[in-house]
């Protein structure tokens, strides 16, 4: 029996079928390539985002570490200030009872008080603190109170700036004097003790002074 016409593909129909099949395969290949490209792009973006996240977390950790270090530093500064103030208050109490401050200005009080302070705080036995004038290359700098000497094999110098009110500008001006004196001594090995002395020390001045290892001493008893 001869088969019906619709049960077989003609050559033309078969070729059309193959052509469509090839087209389907080509389109499928392109879709897969596009999907692969999109996936790779998403993967790249994810990796970039992950890198940003990791960097941010790292910065946050460093920031937290910095905050913790800064907190510890402030606590240490506060502890040192309290220790200094206890020494100062004790000296003030003793000196006031003996009337040693009568008739003295700020520098006069400093010259008396700081001798006790420097002995108890730094182990330096000082007979007298005096004004000192440094000059170099036509420039002159006056230090309100000055002392130099030795403790053991080490040479020490004490630089004191006295002010009725110690503000931020007082600290900056004192730093200029300190640098001038440091240049004067050049490479000579000396231990420099830097002190700002006065009855009123403003908070912003105290903060700046601590950053530069300048000791703050007040002739007014403070609560600690």
Image: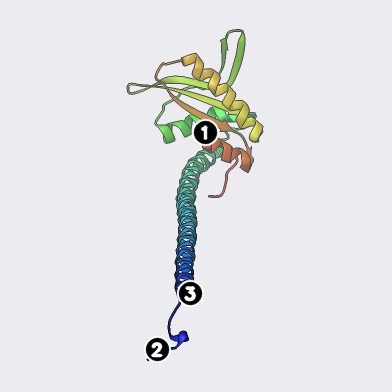
- The image's colouring method is rainbow
The reply to whether residue 130 is in sight is: no
Q: Secondary structure at mark 1?
A: loop
Cα separation, mark 1 vs mark 2, equals 111 Å
In the image, 138: left or right of 224?
right
Cα separation, mark 1 vs mark 3, equals 94 Å
Cα separation, mark 3 vs mark 2, equals 20 Å
Q: Going 53% across and 29% down the picture, which residue do you hit?
A: 112
Callout 1 environment at 10 Å: few (<14), some (14 to 19), or many (20+)? few
Which sits earlier in the primary sequence, circle 1 or circle 2?
A: 2
Which sits earlier in the primary sequence, circle 3 or circle 2?
A: 2
Front residue of 216 and 100: 216
Q: Secondary structure at mark 2?
A: loop
Residue under numbered circle 2 = 2
Q: Going 64% across and 29% down the picture, which residue do you hit?
A: 105
Q: Secondary structure at mark 3?
A: helix
Residue 26 coordinates in the image, percent (x, y): 46, 63
Q: Which label number is shown at residue 13? A: 3
Residue 120 coordinates in the image, percent (x, y): 42, 35
Q: Going 52% across and 33% down the picture, which residue do you hit?
A: 212
Residue 115 coordinates in the image, percent (x, y): 48, 29
Relative to 103, say whether 29 is above or below. below
Front residue of 51 and 69: 51
Residue under numbered circle 1 = 212
Report if the CB atoms under discs 1 and 3 are less than 8 Å apart.
no
The reply to whether residue 116 is in sight is: yes
Relative to 22, say whether 71 is above or below. above
Callout 3 environment at 10 Å: few (<14), some (14 to 19), or many (20+)? few
Q: Residue furthest bottom?
A: 1
Q: Which label number is shown at residue 181? A: none
């Amino acid at each position: 029996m001869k088969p019906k016409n619709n049960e077989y593909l003609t050559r033309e129909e078969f070729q059309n079928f193959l052509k469509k099949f090839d087209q389907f395969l080509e389109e499928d290949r392109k879709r897969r390539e596009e999907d692969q490209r999109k996936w790779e792009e998403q993967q790249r973006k994810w990796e970039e985002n992950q890198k940003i996240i990791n960097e941010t977390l790292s910065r946050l950790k460093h920031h937290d570490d910095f905050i913790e270090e800064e907190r510890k530093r402030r606590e240490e500064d506060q502890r040192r200030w309290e220790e200094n103030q206890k020494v100062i208050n004790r000296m003030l109490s003793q000196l006031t009872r003996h009337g040693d401050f009568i008739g003295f200005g700020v520098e006069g009080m400093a010259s008396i008080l700081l001798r006790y302070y420097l002995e108890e705080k730094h182990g330096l036995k000082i007979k007298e603190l005096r004004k000192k004038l440094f000059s170099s290359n036509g420039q002159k700098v006056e230090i309100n109170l000055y002392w130099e000497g030795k403790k053991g094999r080490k040479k020490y110098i004490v630089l004191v700036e006295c002010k009725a009110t110690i503000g931020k500008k007082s600290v900056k001006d004192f730093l200029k004097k300190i640098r001038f004196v440091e240049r004067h001594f050049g490479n000579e090995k000396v231990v420099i003790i830097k002190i700002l002395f006065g009855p009123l020390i403003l908070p912003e001045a105290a903060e700046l002074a601590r950053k530069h290892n300048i000791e703050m001493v007040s002739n007014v008893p403070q609560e600690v």
